Amino acid sequence: MKIAIYPGSFDPITYGHLDVLERGAEIFDKVIIAVSYNCNKKGFLEPDVRKELVKKSVGHIKNVEVDSFDGLTIEYARKQGACVLLRGLRAVSDFEYEMQLSQTNSALADDIKTVFLITKPEYTFISSSTVREILLNNGDISKFVPPPVEKFLTSMVCKI
């Protein structure tokens, strides 16, 4: 069984993330979308909230599991028996960072490969930080995130 790990902060998950995930799920037997937790970084949403929103957003994809982790992605991938790290590219600006990350992971575990999927053109401009910016300025985020995420985030902002 070919298992891929799709790691990220998903703070929050967007339609761009889902695009990469759905296409990755067509290629691999199982994809684990792994919400990363870094105790040195303060996220917008708590890790458990991000994980729950991801679960609510990916239920329609049968061969996808949702998990969370901290530490090195490559170590998490090993523990899960994964042979691939799945990464999304939106624009050329993502490439340099992702290439460095891929080469570092390869140096740590050359048996785990990185596969890049380029998002569809309609998602190239969507990022979690853009969604947060629009949200915090009372803009409409419904075009950028799945309904469970939009519902949660707009209710959260109304309470602030």
Image (cartoon, rainbow, N blue to C red):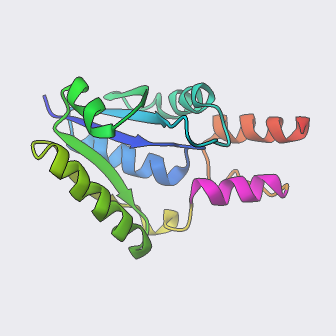
Q: Nearer the viewer, residue 39 or 157?
A: 39
Pick the quarter of the image with the N terminus.
top left
**Would you place residue 56 above or below residue 123 in this image?**
above
| Residue at point 69%, 50% (across, down) | 142
Number of labels in the image equals 0
What is the x, y in percent for residue 34? Answer: 40, 34
Residue 62 in the magenta stretch? The answer is no
| Residue at point 65%, 38% (across, down) | 149
Quadrant position of residue 100 = bottom left
Pick the quarter of the image with the C terminus.
top right
| Residue at point 50%, 62% (across, down) | 123
Drawn side of residue 78 relative to residue 14, left or right: left
Q: Which residue lies most toward the bottom here?
A: 92
Q: Which residues are magenta?
A: 127-137
**Would you place residue 91 above or below residue 148 in this image?**
below
Drawn side of residue 53 relative to residue 17, left or right: right
Regarding residue 30, the answer to whether it shows in the image is no
Regarding residue 69, the answer to whether it shows in the image is yes
Q: Nearer the viewer, residue 147 or 9?
A: 9
**Would you place residue 2 above or below residue 19 in this image?**
above
What is the x, y in percent for residue 93? Answer: 43, 73
**Would you place residue 34 above or below residue 140 in this image?**
above
| Residue at point 21%, 30% (across, down) | 78
What is the x, y in percent for residue 81? Answer: 18, 27
What is the x, y in percent for residue 103? Answer: 22, 58
Drawn side of residue 150 relative to residue 33, left or right: right
Quadrant position of residue 41 = top right
Q: Which residue lies most toward the left here?
A: 111
Q: Which residue lies most toward the front here?
A: 40
Tell me the chief SS of the magenta region: helix
Q: Which residue lies most toward the right here?
A: 159
